[in-house]
Amino acid sequence: MVSLPARPRPLDLDPARAALVIVDMQNAFVREGGLLDLAGLDVSSAQAVVEKIRAILDAARPAGLAVVYLQIGYAPDLADSGGPASPNWHKELALVLMRERPELRGTLLVHGTWDGAIVDELKPEPGDIVIPKCRYSGFAGTALDSVLRSRGITHLVFTGIATNVCVESTLRDAFFHEYWPILVSDATMQAGPESLQSATLFNVETFFGWVTTTRDLISGLGQG
């Protein structure tokens, strides 16, 4: 067991029963020319998040944490998007942009495209778990819960983009599934104004879990 510095109070964590969850670290949300950038949202802080997650990975793997990648995307024919009868069809940013801008059709968050690929610096390694998803939450319509339970995982350390959308959606569902969620504040980035990052951090610290930093997480894992 390690004692992890966190807010609102420190949390005991068994690395053998914990997983690092890397949410949607794809070109779409990190790079210029990706989905968020094309939608007019600021991605200038994304590279710093990549570097923080890289440092966490380098500490988490030797400490024994499982590594789980969530990767949002759609089939080329968008059959898994829900179609016009689904609210996802009307609200998910890639689907909206591809309808509004015909030149982008088939290029945003579609399997096999550059936009949908995990960034090179954080490519999964053999033994890592990759969970494809086609909704904001990593638990929606996926095997995530069964995979975690089969490994005896109880604590989930969340990193990735976007804090206020897919990260928070998955973290809330984790809480409802009786996992212990831990959000790494500086290894996440919001989509939209900075106030949205603060809002999610408040929600997690107050209602849904614990908040830590990259430095404190790595320091805590080093106790093992």
Image (cartoon, grey):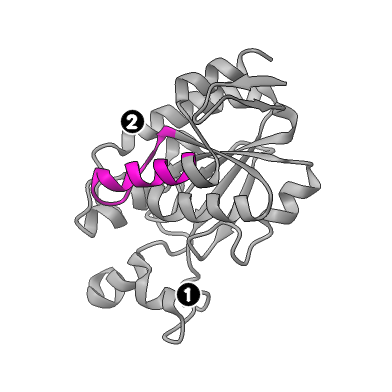
Decide: few, some or many residues near mark 2? Use Cα within 10 Å; few <14, some 14-19, many ≥20.
some
| Residue at x 69%, y 38% (from the top left corner) | 127
Residue 123 visible? The answer is yes
| Residue at x 48%, y 75% (from the top left corner) | 81
In the image, 74 versus 140, the foreground residue is 140
Q: Which residues are magenta?
A: 185-205
Asked if disc 1 and disc 2 are in contact, CB closer than 8 Å, the reply is no
Amino acid identity at mark 1: Ser
**Relative height, residue 109 to residue 148 (above, below):** below
Q: Which residue is mark 2?
A: 48
Instruction: Give the image location of residue 138, x and y in percent.
Output: 56, 56
Amino acid identity at mark 2: Ala
SS assignment at label 1? loop
Residue 190 is inside the magenta segment: yes
Instruction: Give the image location of residue 71, x and y in percent.
Output: 51, 53
Instruction: Give the image location of residue 24, x and y in percent.
Output: 46, 49
Identify the image quadrant of residue 94.
bottom left
Q: Is residue 190 left or right of residue 187?
A: left
| Residue at x 24%, y 71% (from the top left corner) | 103
Instruction: Give the image location of residue 142, x and y in percent.
Output: 64, 62
**Relative height, residue 50 to residue 10 (above, below):** below
- Quadrant placement of the N terminus: top right
Q: Which residue is mark 1?
A: 81
Q: Earlier in the sequence, mark 1 or mark 2?
A: 2
SS assignment at label 2? helix
**Residue that lies at the very extreme toward the left in this rendered image:** 40
Decide: few, some or many residues near mark 1? Use Cα within 10 Å; few <14, some 14-19, many ≥20.
some
Residue 106 visible? The answer is no
Distance between the alpha carbons at the discs numbered 1 and 2: 31 Å
Q: Is residue 166 left or right of residue 222?
A: left
**Relative height, residue 117 to residue 39 (above, below):** above
